[in-house]
Every structure is written in structure tokens, then in C-alpha cells.
Amino acid sequence: MAPKASAHFSAASESVSKDFQSGVSDVYKNQISIEANVKALQISLSTFAKQQKLWLDLVDNFNTALKELGDVENWSELIERDFEIVAKTVAHIQEESSM
């Protein structure tokens, strides 16, 4: 009876060992897959960060251009007022000289 029990114990032990090795193999494959996904994610994040920097630079440049445009608009309004004053002054002088 002992040889039969030993054979059963040996078979059970071998089965458990194979199952354990299979599980370890699956875990290792999953770890490799996860590491590859992490690397891909890191690359994607790096690309996104670079793109985000470009967008922020574009927005900053756009804001600067808007400020400059506002400055130009203000400048043109000042010039327009100055010309109106000059035109009114010239018209007033012409009126007085024609009298």
C-alpha cells in the first residue's frame, strides 16, 4: 500500500508543482506586459507634455498679440483724436482768416 500512496503523493506533488509553475509563468508574462504598457504610457505622457508646452506657448503668444493689438488700437485712437484737434484748429484758423 505504501508504494501506491507514494505514487499518488508524487503525482499530486507534481500536479501542484506544475500548477504553481504555470501560475508563476502567468505572473511573469503579466509583469512583462505591464512593464511594456508603463513604458508606452511614459512615452505618451512625454509626448502629451511636449504638446501641452506648445499649446501653452501658443496661448501665451496669442495673449501677447492681443495686448499689442489693444495697444495699437489705443495708439490709433490717440492719433485720430490728435488729427481731429488739428483739423478743427486748421478749420478755426481758416474761418478767422476769411473774416
Image (tube, rainbow, N blue to C red):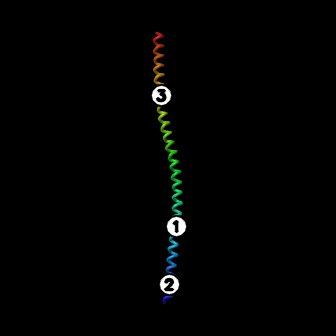
Is 9 rendered above or below residue 70?
below
Point 47% across, 19% down: residue: 86
Point 52% across, 73% down: residue: 21
Q: Give the number of the disc on residue 74.
A: none
Question: Element at badge 2?
Answer: helix
Is 16 rendered above or below residue 26?
below
Residue nearest the observer in this picture, 59 or 42: 42
Point 50% across, 47% down: residue: 52
In the image, residue 36 lies at what x, y percent?
Answer: 54, 60
**Mark 3 and mark 2 in contact (Cβ < 8 Å)?**
no
Residue farthest top in this picture? 99
In the image, residue 81 lies at what x, y percent?
Answer: 46, 24
In the image, residue 74 lies at what x, y percent?
Answer: 46, 29
Q: CA distance from mark 3 to mark 1?
A: 70 Å
Question: Element at badge 1?
Answer: helix
Q: Which residue is mark 1?
A: 28
Q: CA distance from mark 1 to mark 2?
A: 30 Å
User: Pointer 3: residues within 10 angstroms few (<14), some, or many (20+)?
Assistant: few
In the image, residue 70 lies at what x, y percent?
Answer: 47, 33
Q: Which residue is mark 3?
A: 75
Q: Nearer the viewer, mark 3 or mark 1?
A: 1
Q: Which residue is mark 2?
A: 8
Given the image, on which type of amino acid does mark 2 rest? His
